[in-house]
Amino acid sequence: MIWKDTTYRGWGRALTAKGALARPERQAALTSLLAEGLLPAIGNRRSYGDAALNSDGRAIDMTRLDRFLSFDADTGLLEVEAGAMIGDIAARFAPLGWLPAVMPGTGFATVGGCIAQDVHGKNHHHMGSFCQHVISIRIRTHKGVQEAGPEKNAELFRATAGGLGQTGVILSARLRLIPCKGDVMVVTERRIEGWEDFLAHLDRSEATYTVGWIDATATGASLGRGILEEGETGAGLVPKRVKYRKVPFEAPHFALSAPIVRAFNQLYYRRVPVSGRTLVKPISDFFFPLDKIHDWNRLYGKRGFHQFQCVVPIASAPALRDMMEKISTSGLASPLAVLKRMGPGRAGHLSFPMEGYTLAVDFPNRAEARELIGRLEALTAAAGGRLYFAKDGLAGPDSMAAMYPELADWRKQVKKADPEGRLATDMVRRLRLRDVA
Amino acid sequence: MSTTMKQTWIILGATSSMARAFARKQAAEGAAVLLAGRDMDDLNLLAEDCRLRGARLAEALAFDARHPDGFEALIARMDAEEGVLNAAVFVGSMPPQADIDADPALIDGTVTDSFTGPARFLQLLAPKMEARGGGTVVGVGSVAGDRGRLGNYVYGAAKAGFHTYLSGLRNRLTRAGGHVVTVKPGFVDTSMTWGLPGMFLVASPEKVADDIARAVRKRRNVIYTPFFWRFIMLIIIHVPEMIFKKMKI
């Protein structure tokens, strides 16, 4: 059958859509699906909220259109179908000395999804965002198949990069890979004792890849303590992972209750010796640490979870500290919390990054947590920051124009590419991104 | 089978998702993959994909189970490669039983696609494999071939015929150092099963391809994939006919 009536969710499993999905395995099948009109395209649904959901409508699952189309071993230019996964590309090309220039925190993200969210990685401060390394895309808009890139059809490209799939169905992309030394990572981990110390370390870090794990339950003098990880690619031999683990069922909701999270975080923090340490690990373990546990999102139980992620300008660091304090004292956070320094790099009108600090924290889907996330959203807006569409599932429409000042430019292009509004998703409707202000 | 010998795989029905996953596995091992099927545009994309994943050589070739005139050319193309010749058969068609009830002529096509077409191809290939003293044939059948039932008994009958053919071919090729693996997949997440009601314990094409590759390595004779289908089918086969004939499964 072409259409499967199903219920599907964002990665956080808190938001659900009922609708029909098609999953073409060949270009010809996709072409015939789109002959009747545009439809939203979705990838591996690694966006946490409702960016990849289309309730009561149809959508195209692009994951089977995942082929490598061409590669130039001299320049590192790789062309792939939109459903190709970042982890698949890294696994194949890292041993040959090439890596995607920007990789998000999961290797299961598709290239189409990475473009639609203009994702960033642990090297954003050096390399900017994903779409800054996209040479060109082929995209099926209202007008037919078009090619777009930073030079050709630049306006369409700027609306597509981070554009939540609203300009058309991305068919393929040409990416610039960057040279790497091999498929292992040399990673230095050190303890960070508190908030100010953390920011100072992030500012100073000269490593190619930098990320901070933050203990979102530590309060008082240890507020903002955590572990700084700095990585460089290298050549060498490390045991390859043989088997993935799977979370076979939904965990009971007390699994992530405050005392358990506090205890886990304590252990996780102390696992790194006071003097720090340097490890060598497979590239995927550093970039995609959670991918080795399939379906880890089930650990949050059947109610699912929300991730809050914001970025604030450097000058607003005190406001971010204030948010951290609210999170830590709430006792609601999970062990998954990340602090990173961002550079200014972004490629699209709705791209998330801005020069500053970004904080991401998971919360179980409970009323108190949703209420806290609402307050954090307001603080983000007041600090001149913005929320990340790849994570958000709760925000309201009011602060969007302030957070995304190029929203009007984006709308203009989207209107040209999809005049009938056929590509709208649950997120676009919730945040009224496409309504004329 | 020596792993140092150059391997060549012809993959019949290479556009299916199971075949694609299997072709990629062989490509990653550095084999030559000859991708045979009807949608040449799609096969050309897959050929490039396989080259980029490490295939020594990857080519798209036209193959239609209903047009045996083209088989000789494929065999000749294979014979031009040095080393070990292998074949994996992923072709088959399963029109809804209701369509067959309305038009019994559909039976001919179903049997050709799922059994006699690939059997005629393998019959031409067998002497070449014997002459080289080795190689493996992977024949993808179906659990539907283990017992005829209301929903798809024509397809099931064709696959049952194919299973029996493969068993005989195994008997023949073993004498020459070759091998035949019969693969009986349960429910696999492909475009054929997408959206069908009543699916359970659905396996990914990659999982099935892993199972097949392991069976080739270990020279297994008949495998169910995923493995637990062996037990499900063991039960189904042993339900007495006087009860089975009244069941709707």
Image (tube, helix red, strand yellow):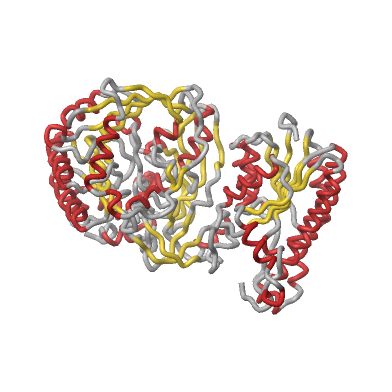
- Relative image position of residue A173 (x, y in whole percent): 47, 43
- Relative image position of residue A146 (x, y in whole percent): 47, 50
- The answer to whether residue B37 is visible is no
Placement of A330 over or under B156, stated as above or below: above
Please tell me which residue is depicted at 58% across the width and 57% down the height of the picture: B188
From the viewer's perspective, tell me whether residue A271 is left or right of residue A232. left
Please tell me which residue is depicted at 86% across the width and 43% down the height of the picture: B175
- Relative image position of residue A408 (x, y in whole percent): 25, 53
Please tell me which residue is depicted at 20% across the width and 58% down the height of the picture: A367
Where is residue B107, by image quadrant?
Answer: bottom right
In the picture, which quadrant includes the C terminus of chain A? Answer: bottom left
From the viewer's perspective, tell me whether residue A263 is left or right of residue B243. left
Q: Residue furthest top?
A: A275
- The answer to whether residue A307 is visible is yes
Give the number of callouts: 0
From the viewer's perspective, tell me whether residue B71 is left or right of residue A58. right
Placement of B234 over or under B241, stated as above or below: above
Where is residue B78, by image quadrant?
Answer: top right
Please tell me which residue is depicted at 32% across the width and 28% down the height of the picture: A229
- Relative image position of residue B7 (x, y in whole percent): 73, 36
Where is residue B93, by image quadrant?
Answer: bottom right
Placement of A335 over or under A282, stated as above or below: below
In the picture, which quadrant includes the N terminus of chain A? Answer: bottom right
